[in-house]
Amino acid sequence: MTIAIIPSRYGSSRFEGKPLRLIAGKSMIQRVYEQAQKSKAISQTIVATDDERIIKAVKAFGGKAVMTSDDCRSGTDRVAQTAQIMGLGPDEIIVNIQGDQPVFNPLTIDELIAPFAADPDLVMSTLAFKIQDTREITDPKDVKVTFDNNQFALYFSRAQIPYPRDPGTKADFYKHLGFYAYKKSFLDKMVTLPTGTCEQIEKLEQLRVLEFGYKIKVVITPYDSPEIDLPEDIERIESTF
């Protein structure tokens, strides 16, 4: 059984109330929820939040939501708390779906969890997309990832990585899409780890995993998943409908 959990906060320094903003007539959280439900790999979808307004909105469109603590340090901690509330077993696969990417392709969920069937020792995977828009290579809003020959992550950064030293050097750049899959047993371990140094500097929670010596499988998907960071991003997303 694979469970999708969508961490969703009402409060945001850049865009308060973002999950409830309308995208072509539906709230963003409903758009994300409905995309998750389209995945054949997902047996159940849950919204994890700390706000009653989001709980009410999810229930209004027939979705399922869980109230979590308001002191979770990251979305991953909120997902882990939800998994505990649901009583999920250690071998369950949990998918952490970004709540601000309302038009993601459901096929990416199948791609994300596929490596677990091939590698019984795998504990965590994530998605990356080969950058097409050169602006994203240097924009700190778009997180980049590099990986080894076995497609395990080497580093995630808001900076351009890798950085071609010599002019004219060709390189491919990959954008991290922010979706994760974990075994429940590893998720429980991950949230007990202290905040890492690089995690604190870059404000990227996945760096905690690498800093403490664990591996993240990077799955390259052909499907981009644009996110909504600011109110002005809504018009861009709506133009895709």
Image (cartoon, rainbow, N blue to C red):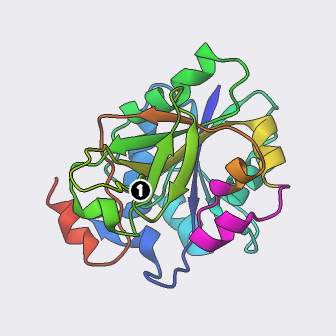
Q: Residue 228 location in percent, x, y?
A: 35, 66
How many labels sit on residues? Answer: 1
Q: Residue furthest bottom?
A: 13
The residue shown at (39%, 60%) is 160
* Amino acid type, label 1: Gln
The residue shown at (47%, 82%) is 16
Mark 1 neighbour class, 10 Å CA radius: few under 14, some 14 to 19, many 20 or more: many
Q: Residue 58 location in percent, x, y?
A: 51, 59
Q: Is residue 82 left or right of residue 59?
A: right
Quarter of the figure that contains the N terminus: top right
Above or below, 196 relative to 154:
below
The magenta span reads 192-207
The question of residue 197 being in magenta is answered with yes
Query: Looking at the image, which is closer to me, 16 or 173?
Result: 173
Above or below, 225 relative to 70:
above
Residue 51 visible? The answer is no
The residue shown at (42%, 61%) is 100
Q: Residue 20 location in percent, x, y?
A: 42, 71
Above or below, 143 relative to 229:
above
Q: Which residue is mark 1?
A: 30
Residue 57 visible? The answer is yes
The question of residue 82 being in magenta is answered with no
Query: Looking at the image, which is closer to me, 227 or 134?
Result: 134
Q: Residue 85 location in percent, x, y?
A: 80, 50
The residue shown at (73%, 64%) is 68
Q: Is residue 25 left or right of residue 163?
A: left
Q: Is residue 31 left or right of residue 54?
A: left
Q: Quadrant of residue 27?
A: bottom left
**Callout 1 secondary element:** helix
